[in-house]
């Protein structure tokens, strides 16, 4: 067969009816047939006769119709998926025997095409019209596309085999109840009940469909009576229901370590169990460089508000945090930190603390005697004095001054106490343990309370708005108890507390008087205390060393 200088295109025609493949050459330079016609030149034997040409024309026309239909049908498929699918199909179909031809002429064509191409190793390209148009593109050159006989178009696109993935412990298949199909309201559910004002446990359980006898069997359980019956607004109760909307479980988180579970048993009897899960405890060290105040600098060092208040209470007899703090003072705290499931949930007790100023160093250690824990200095002397330096947490508006001019009388009149400015209703605390010797109205003092502390000391609280209901003359009070509320009764220009401190009946400046110390540890307790502070000092030094090492990195 003659070879053209220019590229030749092969058109593969598939006769689906007779299962015969026709290969027809279209020359780019010479497309005219015999007698100048525009018919393609067939390479079939005996094409010179009119009978052969007529037979070929019919075959070609049928092939064109089949290919046009095939291209339109396959336009829905992408080129990439088609190429990958046909590759696997060619390898299988090349081994199939050729079907017997109905006519000798088509058999000769098939034989000649198979011999002529000799490109069995080349993967065929199936070109589809993805845009549903009739524009003819350039066809591949002869020799690039092998001929493949297929019985149907589906054979050219075999399904891609999916690899099975290994699954560990596959979930079993459960046959759904016909009555529950697509009824999501009847599936097992978990409901969180938030208690509001007026709610009762019986009422909440009744809303979940429990009968009176079931509610009675739950509320009479000892654990439920202790931890669940007396519910308060804001608390949360978790209930679980099965597919039949029947209560199966009640859960109440009591605190970080306790959880109450109420379970329905197979015999429909309820049982209660208290789950105890202790928190993980670690010791941590916090250091604060004071610049302005304990509250601001402590918060900047990530100390909790409760811990800052505890530090203030520990050192309140040794350090006046409102007036004595200077820039450069340092505070170190060794404390307990509690964790749940790896997450910090709360701070514990302060075990040791140190306040270091330019003038002095104060240390405090926690020690428990019986059921009461207090803080002591390294010698075993209690840091808690017999009196609070300030009976109220407020700013001083007028100091102790024996030559002060009275703001109302405008005369020189001794101010024998300290005034604290605070809003009306602010609680006022007893400076120490004692007995109330006066509670009522006293001239210019207005509503006043006087307390006797032992034989030598007395304190006075004036201009109060009101007294606690149970406070009266003869009442016993302890250090820190509320004895009144800030007001402006008597001769007062505004709401404030007037506080006086007397020793043997003589007035002293509450901010400067030397307060009597607390009770020291007895000898039997002092030995155990000495051993505990050695352990705390060692831990203090270890954590401080680790902190310094991390800071240097």
Image: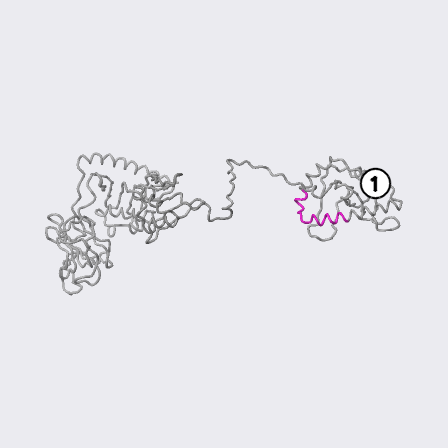
Tell me if mark 1 has few (under 14), some (14-19) or many (20+) residues whose alpha carbon lies within 10 angstroms of its own: few
- Residue 239: % across, % down: 39, 46
In the foreground, 101 or 130: 101
Q: Position of residue 166 (x, y in %)?
A: 55, 35
Residue 366 screen position, x and y as percent:
25, 40
In the image: residue 91, left or right of residue 291: right
- Pick the quarter of the image with the N terminus: top right
Residue 116 vs 209, above or below: the answer is: above
Number of numbered markers = 1
Magenta: main secondary structure equals helix
Q: What stretch is highlighted in magenta?
A: 65-83
Whether residue 279 is visible to the viewer of this picture, yes or no, is no
- Give whichever of 203, 502 is nearer the camera: 203
Q: Quadrant of the C terminus?
A: top left
Residue visible at 68% across and 38% down in the picture: 88
Provide the secondary structure element on which disc 1 rests.
loop
Answer whether residue 77 is magenta in the image.
yes
Whether residue 131 appears in magenta in the rendering, the answer is no
Q: Is residue 404 above or below residue 233?
A: below
The residue indicated by pointer 1 is 103
Image-based side of 432 in relation to 73, left or right: left
């Amino acid at each position: 067969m003659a070879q053209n200088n220019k590229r030749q295109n092969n058109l593969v025609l598939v006769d689906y009816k007779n299962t015969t493949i026709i290969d027809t050459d279209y020359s780019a330079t010479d497309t005219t047939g015999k007698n100048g016609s525009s018919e393609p030149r067939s390479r079939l034997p005996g094409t010179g006769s009119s009978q052969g040409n007529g037979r070929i024309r019919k075959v070609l026309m049928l092939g064109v119709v089949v290919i046009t239909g095939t291209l339109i049908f396959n336009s829905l498929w992408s080129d990439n998926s088609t190429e990958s699918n046909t590759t696997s199909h060619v390898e299988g179909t090349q081994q199939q025997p050729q079907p017997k031809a109905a006519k000798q002429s088509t058999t000769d064509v098939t034989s000649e095409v198979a011999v002529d191409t000799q490109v069995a190793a080349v993967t065929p390209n199936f070109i589809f019209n993805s845009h549903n148009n009739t524009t003819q593109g350039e066809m591949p050159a002869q020799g690039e596309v092998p001929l493949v006989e297929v019985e149907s178009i589906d054979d050219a696109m075999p399904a891609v085999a999916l690899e099975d993935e290994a699954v560990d412990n596959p979930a079993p298949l459960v046959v759904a109840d016909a009555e529950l199909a697509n009824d999501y309201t009847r599936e097992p559910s978990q409901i969180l009940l938030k208690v509001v004002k007026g709610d009762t446990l019986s009422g909440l359980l009744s809303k979940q469909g429990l009968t009176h006898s079931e509610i009675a069997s739950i509320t009479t359980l000892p654990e439920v009576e202790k931890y669940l019956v007396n519910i308060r607004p804001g608390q949360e109760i978790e209930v679980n229901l099965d597919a039949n909307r029947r209560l199966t479980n009640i859960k109440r988180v009591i605190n970080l370590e306790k959880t109450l579970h109420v379970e329905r048993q197979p015999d429909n009897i309820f049982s209660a169990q208290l789950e105890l899960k202790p928190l993980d405890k670690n010791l941590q060290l916090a250091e604060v460089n004071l610049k302005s105040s304990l509250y601001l600098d402590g918060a900047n060092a990530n100390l909790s508000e409760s811990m800052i208040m505890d530090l203030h209470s520990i050192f309140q007899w040794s350090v006046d945090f409102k007036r004595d703090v200077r820039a450069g003072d340092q505070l170190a705290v060794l404390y307990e930190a509690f964790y749940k499931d790896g997450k910090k949930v709360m701070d514990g007790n302060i075990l040791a603390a140190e306040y270091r100023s330019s003038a002095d160093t104060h240390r405090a250690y926690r020690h428990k005697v019986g059921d009461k824990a207090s803080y002591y200095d390294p010698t075993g002397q209690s840091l808690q004095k017999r009196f609070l330096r300030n009976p109220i947490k407020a700013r001083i508006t007028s100091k102790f001054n024996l030559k002060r001019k009275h703001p109302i009388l405008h005369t020189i009149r001794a101010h024998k106490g300290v005034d604290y400015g605070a809003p009306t209703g602010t609680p006022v605390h007893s400076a120490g343990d004692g007995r109330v010797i006066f509670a009522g109205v006293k001239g210019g003092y207005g509503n006043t309370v006087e307390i006797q502390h032992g034989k030598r000391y007395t304190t006075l609280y004036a201009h109060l708005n009101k007294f606690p209901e149970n406070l009266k003359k003869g009442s016993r009070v302890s250090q820190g108890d509320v004895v009144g509320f800030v007001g402006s009764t008597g001769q007062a220009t505004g709401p404030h507390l007037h506080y006086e401190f007397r020793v043997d009946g003589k007035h002293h400046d509450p901010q400067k008087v030397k307060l009597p110390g607390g009770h020291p540890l007895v000898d039997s307790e002092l030995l155990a205390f000495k051993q505990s502070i050695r352990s705390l000092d060692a831990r203090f030094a270890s954590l401080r060393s680790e902190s310094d090492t991390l800071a240097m990195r």
